[in-house]
Image (cartoon, rainbow, N blue to C red):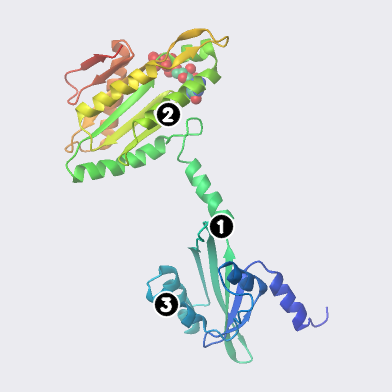
Amino acid sequence: MGTLSDGFLIRVIDSVSSNIAVLDEDFNIVFVNQSWIEFGIQNGQKRAFNWLGLNYKSSCLPSENDGDEFVVLAMRGLAEIKAGQRHSFIMEYPCHSPDQDRWFIMRIDRFISEGLMYFVISHQDISDRVRLEQEARSLARIDALTNIANRRTFDEFVQSEWGHCKRSNQTLSIAILDLDDFKLINDNCGHQHGDECLKEVAKILSMYTGRASDICARYGGEEFVLAWGNMGHEKSLELSKRILKEINNIKVRYNDGKLYGRLTASIGLYTASPCLEKVEQGVFNADELMYRAKRIGKNSICDDQKLVNVAFCKTS
Ligand SMILES: Nc1nc2c(ncn2[C@@H]2O[C@H](COP(=O)(O)OP(=O)(O)OP(=O)(O)O)[C@@H](O)[C@H]2O)c(=O)[nH]1
């Protein structure tokens, strides 16, 4: 292969999708590629703007003085490379436009040519990758069928909410809700209809857990869990009763459309006082109470703050 011409090499650099600028050792821009120019235009710069000679460090100074953490980091990286403390610098950062969330990766490298030091700054759009990562993270936290939180999300949330409640000396109410005779519904009306019931229940639960300190989650098969931060026993019992009533309004049908019956559930409700040591104990207590509601006759709420007196509440 013969020696490549300057024009050829510039065309190669212009065809790269990363935005590239080369700075001299005083941080003056001595070269930008086409992607850099296009990105400038997208962000309001004129096409005819002359980038060459612009001092990169000075142009970043207003943002640096404003305390923009990413600009501060980049300038520190640039200074460290110049001082020979590092060879390169890499940083991912958000750079949202008014109509689009965008993320970039910035890289600074250096090279020596004819005894002079140069810096290559490149920015690459990584928005697609970040969006996919965010989507994957959100999928791992949401139950795919019902679109509400999954058990893992609940466990994390309730730990943090319990911390807030303890610090502010408030109670946290926990309800475990298990649909009654769900196997029979699946067997008689079909698994798909069972799925629809689960989705409807999730919608109802979401309506009753709308505050930032509340959560509802699918805990497992046909079992759900709710937590109301900063809520006393009386209020959570009232909400549980309303939830049970709404669930009772869900009609379950055979495949031919004839009525099979109405959906029912058993709820165990436990209100944790701030002196309870671990919130897991509160969830366990609510679960025990739910099983008690099953034994007592289903379609019921069992609540008992001290796990001594069972307050049995038939809602129908
Ligand atoms: N349709 C549907 N069914 C599910 C799902 N997850 C679990 N189930 C069913 O839920 C049923 C739970 O059955 P059991 O544990 O015997 O409980 P149950 O019939 O509700 O009886 P009780 O709890 O005593 O009222 C099983 O048939 C599971 O297959 C799901 O995602 N979709």
Residue 277 coordinates in the image, percent (x, y): 20, 38
Query: Left or right: 3 with respect to 167?
Result: right
Residue 127, which numbered label?
1
Query: Left or right: 279 with respect to 114?
Result: left
What residue is rendered at 24% in x and 45% in y? 164
From this viewpoint, which residue is outermost toward the bottom? Answer: 115
Amino acid at dot 1: Ser
Amino acid at dot 3: Pro
State the CA–CA distance, disc 3 to disc 1. Answer: 26 Å
Amino acid at dot 2: Lys
Most foreground residue, 288 or 182: 182
Q: Residues within 10 Å of mark 1 (few under 14, many from 20)?
A: some
Residue 162 coordinates in the image, percent (x, y): 26, 41
Residue 86 coordinates in the image, percent (x, y): 49, 77
What residue is rendered at 50% in x and 59% in y? 98
Label 2 sits on residue:
203
Residue 62, which numbered label?
3
Q: Mark 2 or mark 1, which is nearer the start of the sequence?
A: 1
Depicted 49 relative to depicted 183: above or below:
below
Depicted 60 relative to depicted 269: above or below:
below
Q: Where, quadrant-wise, is the N terminus in this rendering?
A: bottom right
Question: Which type of secondary structure does the marked residue at label 3 adopt?
Answer: helix
Question: Which type of secondary structure does the marked residue at label 1 adopt?
Answer: helix
Query: Left or right: 207 with respect to 92?
Result: left
Residue 85 seen in the figure: no
Q: Mark 1 or mark 3, which is nearer the start of the sequence?
A: 3
